[in-house]
Image (cartoon, rainbow, N blue to C red):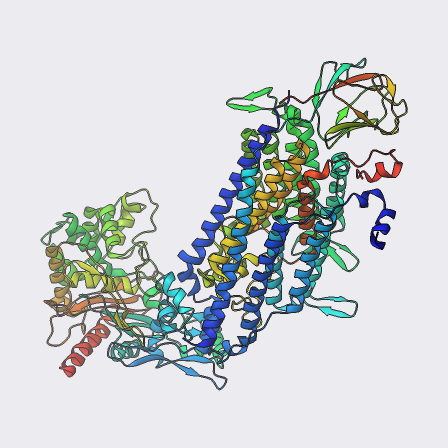
Amino acid sequence: MDGFVLTIWLVRIAFLVLLYLVLFAVVRVLLRDLRAAARDHVALGRLVVVASPAGEPPAGMSFDLDAVTTLGRDVNNTIVIDDPFASAEHASLTYRGRSWFVEDLGSTNGTYVNGAPIDGVSPIGFGDEIQVGEVRLRLDRGRP
Amino acid sequence: MTAAASAARGLPAILAAIRPRPRGRELMLLGAVAAALLVGSLSLGTTLAARPVLDTGSVPETVEPALADGRALATYLVALLAVHLAFVVTGRRTDEVLLPVVGLLGGLGLLLMQRLPQGLVTQSFAGLELGLGQVQLVWLLLALGVVGTLGIVVRSDRWLRLYKYTWAAAGIALLLLTFVFGREVNGQRLTLEFGPVAGQPSELLKVILVVFLAGYLSENRSLLTEESTRLGPIRLPPLPYLAPMAAMWAIALGIVVVQRDLGAALLFFAVFLALLYVATGRLSYVLIGVALFLAGSAILYQLFGHVRDRVDIWLDPFVDPLGAGYQVIQALYAFGRGGLLGTGLGAGLPTVGGRMPIPAIHTDFPLAALGEELGLVGLLAILGLYLVVVERGLRIAAAAADDFRAILAAGLSLVVGVQAFIIAAGNLKLIPLTGITLPFISYGGSSLLANAVVVGLLLALSDRGVEPPPPPRPAGRLRRLVGAGR
Amino acid sequence: MSTGRAGLAGSIVRTGVALTLAFAILAGGAGYWTVVEAQRLATAPDNPAVMAAARRLPRGLIEDRFGRWIARSARTDTGETYREYRDQSVSHVVGYASVIYGMTGLERAYDAELRGVTRADPIADLLKKFDPQPVDPSDLRTSIDLRLQRAAVEALGSDPGAVVLLDPRTGEVLALASTPTYDASGIANPATARATFAAHEGDERQPLLPRATLGRYVPGSVFKIVTALAGLDAGAIAPDTTYPDQPEAERAGLAVSGFRIRDGHHPQTGSRPLDLVGATEASCNIWYALAGLDTGGQALTETAAELGFGEAIPFELPVASSQVTNGGGPAPGGFSDDVELASASFGQGETFVTPLQMALVAATVANGGVLVQPRLGLALTSERTGTREIGASPSARVVGEEVARAVRDAMVAAVEGELGRQFTAGAKVPGVTTAGKSGTAELGGSGEPHSWFIGFAPAEAPEIAIAVLVERGGRGGERAAPLAGDLMARYFALKEEAG
């Protein structure tokens, strides 16, 4: 056995060993995360349709909310409001940190919270009612 | 008060809100990755330096340690570190595992490209003549830039979730563009040229597909899980909601027929089925999808020569060992030469007498090249690294705040995992070979950049701090257009 | 209405598990190719690594049974190695090892050993990585006797044909000649390879075809030995079986399913019904047709299969598979009807055989009904491992000893009997009881028939079995039989010389 072959193989095997070292370090991190995780997820909130003269969405319908929810006539919206007085992109609901905000997206007829028109972004609490066109929706807590 | 602090006061409030946050795990893992890559480069460089003597059948008397293009590796490692520092400075709470793991895979790819004949790919750039390794380095640096940028900048997913049909339209437009204007290479119409740069749109398309599917499935999830149709023992959702599945199937078949791109079709359809399952939890969809796939495959096998060729080569490449089966056989020989520990980096045989036994080794067969030089032990490590990426992505998905993010993150990680599986299985003759790239390792700008987008988005999605509110302020028109919530 | 995110997390986990399983399959595939199949792949002759090594490393010697070299390595001025072969008589046995045209023959069969890269197990493979000199070429000693090999090729002369001479007790092949032969040295030498190969490939006499192993020929009467073995073994005929209507049928033809099989020669036997010995001695087609019909297609193909028909005989060189019938016919054994069966029984049906297969038929009779697989390699010798004998060939009993004895007696009569001497003049080895059967394979149309002879000697304790085929060589008794007699005589002379 001579010097070159031995040396080069030591380097080669060191490389393979280091690959596994990285892999083991990564797996250790993964396992630690795994233990820390396992949390129950509850929807952030839900919107219940209180009144809907045009019937789309029907009254009584309930939507589980994502962190960003948009409302309007356009099909690209999370909740499509098929109401003649709603704009294509009417309003958005966003969950930031610990609370909900409603934002008018420049609609023609405006967005109302508990009957009062809003300007730009406005915080909103559970139990509050939002009006988009002639459709009224109530923000409720998400069910577990 | 220092000058810097007073300068900071002048910056917009958003910057003021940024607090640097150390990322200890990432740094530790990156250190290990750098050590591994340096030793790898040492192994490669020393072997290559001794190669002239080794090739005559004798052994050099002295060891001359050398790095294989140490400057390129140093540049790459510095870039990795820079991305890490950028994350630290901006205080993002993103995942700390993905960057080192993907960085190691990219580094392995860099070592491999440095090791293959440099003339395989050449690109003139600003008067410089760049070879395979250097071109790959440039793409890797760009890819790291994409990862860093997306990981830092993306603080809202609104621009992804709101415009799903726009994304779908863009994807279809891209596909049509390729159909019409694509350059044909080996009978496959996969490449679009923009001036001097050629790209493979299917790489970008896979990201768009996942974004669209995440939007569509998260919205229609409850409808898709409702059952209204029964077909014997199989419960089916309302029939109209099966239409997208049929459309997807048709598109996949179209890609095979028109573009002759079996790999992309297989990838798209597999990811589609997996996401459908993730969204609905219904195995019947997967079974129907697999049945459709088998039926489609059978028809394509009957009708199209190129499909039949691929399958026949797969079943027995030794029927035509010097023609159609050549690459596949040579890949198997490479695995066989590798054995348990491999020949060592740089000691393999990608060229024989100046000829390449595997012409597409840098794009389609990097796993065979790595298998030869790192052996089974190295292969298992590489497969493990891909699994880590997938596991990490799925974990981000499971912890996501809502359905859209969950399906998006799952889709992004599955795209990487399924693509790695398809090409690895093709190399190993477990399934017919399809010409797609091995993520992060294969040569190619489109592949590296598209996978960088995937990683960047996964990082952004992993940030549980995306939600904290910027101070509410009046919505401007521009802000709505950009859609980023900052 | 919402199923809740918990369900989604569940399906995400299950998808992850599925993908993990898929990757486990990948790992299995990687292990299969890099460990389980590594030996075969890494030493495959057209593996580029193997070809690259072949360019600069010498291969081991190939020797005949007495240690005379047959193939050796030489070097060009640039240090690349190439093969030299002793003479053209061994070309079809040894083959060639060429950088350009790959490998054939024993060079291919024992390539890994001759190069010395063969690996026993993954651990040894690991250790070898630390070894500066990774190859250990072995010398291969073969069973060929170079003198008999040369004699066989010379005897065939300019006629295309084949000779197989082997020891029925061990299966060791002493001579395996195919003519015309070719210039293996010319193909192996890079300087002359292309020109030599092109010339041989363009030659319509097909010098590159190893007729002894890959040539398939109509056997004619030599196939009667197979019929006799099958009939006796099945109990359908006995050594004293006679057919009263056989003499008449010789004149008028034998009606089989409305078709008339004609024979019409050997007036020497008169109107006496023949038994096994008589029918073999006179080579009576009618008797054998009747015996074959009694035996039945099933028993005939079964015995033939046990003799090696129907698949490639296990051997170091590629062997074409011999057939009794095309198969697929509705009659038992795959025959299309009794007419085909009757014709096949005397070797004129859809029967095609290799000379090696017919040599094994003779060897089985000689060896008392036991077939020993043929072999060429005897031992491997290398610097590190010393000499390793290549294990004895497997053997299997095909027919009972008394069946073999009865057929042997018939074959002795065919050479030494009063009538036999007329038909197969010259097959007799002086001073040694010789058994054999000639064959004249009619090919239809004009042109000479193939000339066949199979046999063995000494009949009471056989040491050698032989098959001779001369393409378009005329009657078996005229060309093949004397050739076989001379070669067997040469064997005994050489044996006496050696003491």
Residue C206 picture location, percent across and down: 41, 70
Against C460, is B385 above or below?
above
Q: Residue at x 44, y 60 (%)?
A: B340
Residue B159 picture location, percent across and down: 77, 38
Q: Which residue occupies the foreground of this view, C335 or C403?
A: C403
The answer to whether B344 appears left or right of C386 in the picture is right
The quadrant where residue C104 appears: bottom left
Against C199, is C448 above or below?
above
Q: Residue at x 39, y 65 (%)?
A: C125
Q: Work out which residue is located at the far right of the displayed protein and give it.
A: A108
Q: Which residue occupies the foreground of this view, B435 or C177?
A: B435
The answer to whether B409 appears left or right of B346 in the picture is right
What is the number of callouts on the image?
A: 0
Q: Which residue occupies the foreground of this view, C329 or A71?
A: A71
Q: Residue at x 30, y 66 (%)?
A: C450
Q: Is residue C129 visible?
A: yes
Against B223, is C256 above or below?
below
Residue B416 picture location, percent across and down: 61, 46
Question: In which quadrant is the C terminus of chain B drawn?
Answer: top right
Q: Work out which residue is located at the far front of the displayed protein and give it.
A: B1
The quadrant where residue C221 appears: bottom left
Residue A123 picture location, percent across and down: 80, 26
Q: Is residue C270 visible?
A: no
Q: Which residue occupies the foreground of this view, C407 or A13?
A: A13
